[in-house]
Amino acid sequence: MYLELLPNELLFNIFQHLSTPDVLRAFLQLNHRFDELVGKHLYTCEYIDLRTTSKFNFDLFWKQYLAPLADIIWSLSNLVYFRCNTYFGSELAFDTPKVTSPTIKSVYGFRDDWNTSISNLLRHTPQIRCLSINMVGCSRVIDLPTNITSITKLDLLSTKAEFSSLVNFLRRTPNLTYLKLDMIYIAMPAQAWEKLIQKYLTNLKTLHFKMNFIAAKAGSTGAEQVEQIVNTFRNPFWLDEHRWFVQCDWSPITEKCYVYTLPYAFENFNIDFPICFESTCAINSISCFCDRFSNIQHITIDLTDAYRFRYKNGQNDSSTYDCERRSRRYYPVQTNNSSILNPSSATQQLVKMGNVVNNQKIKRRDIQFVTMLLVQDIVFIISTFPISIHKLYSIATIHETKSKLRQ
């Protein structure tokens, strides 16, 4: 008996008794008729389980059945909000829709890379107001033909993007009132910010940015390095006209520099020990300090390669930590006035901060370690903190060329 001779109704009954991977493996790409039948079957399934599907069949499934759904969803007459969740490490991405939506006003999670285009997205969303985009590598936003006057709120993650492409894109959004910008391996000097805002972003009211880059000492001390960066943000434009405050964290070992606005508006926070930091905004109290870092949900600590420290606290409030201490060393953390606290007083201060946070009934808080601590102090603080921390782990990215600093 030949399968081609069976009626469609009987074939649909056969599909219902098979798992999705078996249907794909046995019937997909046999001929045009079977491809149509498989497609109709998948659209009527209550759920689709692809966990045991081969990568080849999964890619076929994506290209033939999932990717076209974007245009179907995009064409919904009352669609206003669209979110696309892209998982890192996946070779498959959301394709730019080929139809125009007259109703969509918010798009979140868009990824501008080799197979998607922010230019095409904007052409197909003439009413867009809010945009969240991940700009990766050599983005093609430089080919924007005209200004995007409809966008008023922009949330942008820029990873290794060219500085010129980033600035060109921001120049094309003259009506922005809210800008949140996370720049990885790229830095924008204070003077460039001022010029961009004064000339092109005159309507901007709220600015949150975070910059992560490598900054060598170049003959200066850690305190001088941090002060030089922060001083560029100490002028009437930042402090008086807009009241935008900035903090700079820098590690003399990893040479990583983090510059961000306060209050801190991002979920992820990095600490590289030892750390020098300075801010354009004074911290008057512990509660004031906590308020400025209230959005943190994930924190990464780089102690040194002498220590291995891992902490994870999920929704079930279970916590584990593993600490290997090869030698008893203190790693000072410099503050504005160069004051150093001993480990015991530092521990007491941070535990006190945790109690303040707990009394304020703040569910998800985290802190910046600004004192001299041993690893066991950190373990004690986190294990006794009345704070729900989603993930805390350490990484060892210390360059061997900096080994003298650890001696």
Image (spheres, rainbow, N blue to C red):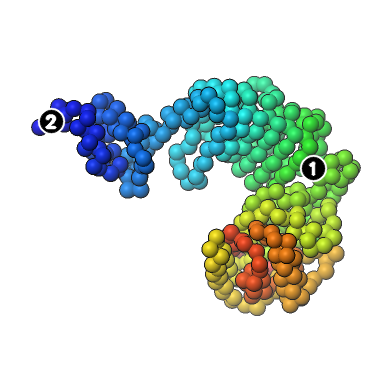
Is any part of residue 397 visible from this angle?
no
- Residue drawn at point x = 55 percent, y = 68 percent: 319
Q: Residue under label 2, please give it.
A: 2
- Residue drawn at point x = 81 percent, y = 48 percent: 245
Q: Residue under label 1, please give it.
A: 190
In this view, the residue in front, 199 or 240, is 240
Residue 65: percent from left, percent from top? 38, 32
The total number of labels drawn is 2
In this view, the residue in front, 265 or 169, is 265
Residue 94: percent from left, percent from top? 49, 35
Q: Quadrant of the N terminus?
A: top left
The mark found on residue 25 in the picture is: none
- Residue drawn at point x = 82 percent, y = 62 percent: 285
Q: Which of marks 2 and 1 is nearer the N terminus?
A: 2
Q: Determine the secondary structure under disc 1.
A: helix
Relative to 241, does residue 332 appear above or below in the rendering?
below
| Label 2, label 1: how far apart the Cα atoms are | 73 Å
Is any part of residue 34 visible from this angle?
yes
Q: Quadrant of residue 241?
A: top right
Instruction: Categorize mark 1 by other alpha carbons within 10 Å: few (<14), some (14-19), many (20+).
Output: some
Identify which amino acid the numbered label 1 is placed on. Ala
Relative to 351, does residue 115 appear above or below in the rendering?
above
- The nearer-to-camera label among 2 and 1 is 2
